[in-house]
Image (spheres, helix red, strand yellow):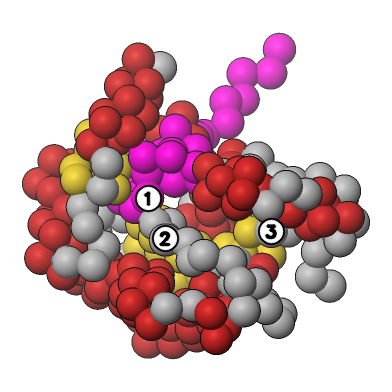
Amino acid sequence: MNNTTITPLLADKVAFVTGAGRGIGAAAARLFAREGARVLLAARTETQLKAVTEEIRSAGGTADHIVCDLADPNSLRAAVDRAVELYGRLDIAFNNAATAQQPGPMDQLPEPDFDHVYTVNLKGVWLAMNAEIAAMRATSGRGAIVNTSSVGSLMANPWLPAYGAVKRAVNSLTASAAATYGPEGIRVNAVAPGTTLTEMLREWDARTPGVIDQFNARTPLGRAAAPEEIAEAAAWLLSDRASYVTGTVLRVDGGMVS
């Protein structure tokens, strides 16, 4: 008789997840809790956060939530501080929150829209990492961070040019942070999802029918990912099983970019 038990991937970790109200972030929050983490969910919409938090708790997990605006440094710091206040420390963070842009050519994107994409998708990640690293230093003394990038950052992106450019900057920020904080035992990686069935993508496909089919035709696996599949990659990168992985942008794209 084999009495071997498998230790949960994130056993005893304290996790902070942004964009946790829906899509990849919600899937990650659920998964991290199932894998043994105590999770603080952060996003702008409290009704969504509350629903996911209650779902995790009803499944036996440990979770709480806080409303957080990625564009507001004080809001972000307060959210990270809340994780430490609730659970005593911070071990891992998944910076997944993002905003979309209206698809279309570069010259048709209004300047305020570009500024918003930059503020949330790049500056927000920078602010979050700064707060998370400070909390990890002050509590655990080590840790791991994963940022959500996009396959759109790894190729020409004529329909989402601002989004793709800012996500490419996230890749650079990830590499720089990995080099800077690696000596302290803080690993920093990114996941680059391909076509993923999030609300954001479904809304685009509703406005422009056939978009998902076009992407799937360019994907060797021939289908879109479920948000849970991206969350699995993030969970592994955040776990001690990825202890020698840092500075990596992991494509989770069904082979779309090769």
Query: Mark 1 Cα within 10 Å, few/some/many (few <14, many 20+)?
Result: many
On screen, residue 87 versus residue 13, left or right, reads left
Q: Can residue 14 be seen in this view?
A: no
Horizontal and vertical percent position of residue 100: 47, 62
Say which element carries label 2.
loop
Q: Residue 115 vs residue 161: left or right?
A: left
The span shown in magenta is 1-30
Give the Cα distance between marks 3 and 1: 18 Å
Q: Which residue is drawn at 42% across and 78% down?
A: 110
Q: For this view, does 128 lie left or right of residue 188?
A: left
Drawn side of residue 105 relative to residue 147, left or right: right
Residue type, mark 3 in image = Gly
Badge 2 amino acid = Ala
Residues at discs 3 and 1 in contact (Cβ within 8 Å): no
Among numbered discs 2 and 3, the one appearing first in the sequence: 2
Q: In which quarter of the image is the C terminus?
A: bottom right
| Residue at the image position 63 percent from the left and 43 percent from the top | 206
C-beta proximity under 8 Å, tags 2 and 3: no
Q: Where is residue 97 in the image (x, y as percent from the top left)?
A: 39, 57
Quadrant for residue 141, please give it: bottom left
Q: Is residue 196 above or below residue 147?
A: above
Mark 1 highlights which residue?
19
How far is disc 2 from disc 1 in space, using C-alphas?
7 Å
Q: Residue 98 carries which label?
A: 2
Q: Contact (CB < 8 A) between labels 2 and 1?
A: yes
Question: Amino acid type of disc 1?
Answer: Gly
Q: Which residue is drawn at 67% across and 77% down?
A: 157
Dot 3 or dot 1: first in sequence order is 1
Residue 56: give x, y in percent of width and height: 37, 25
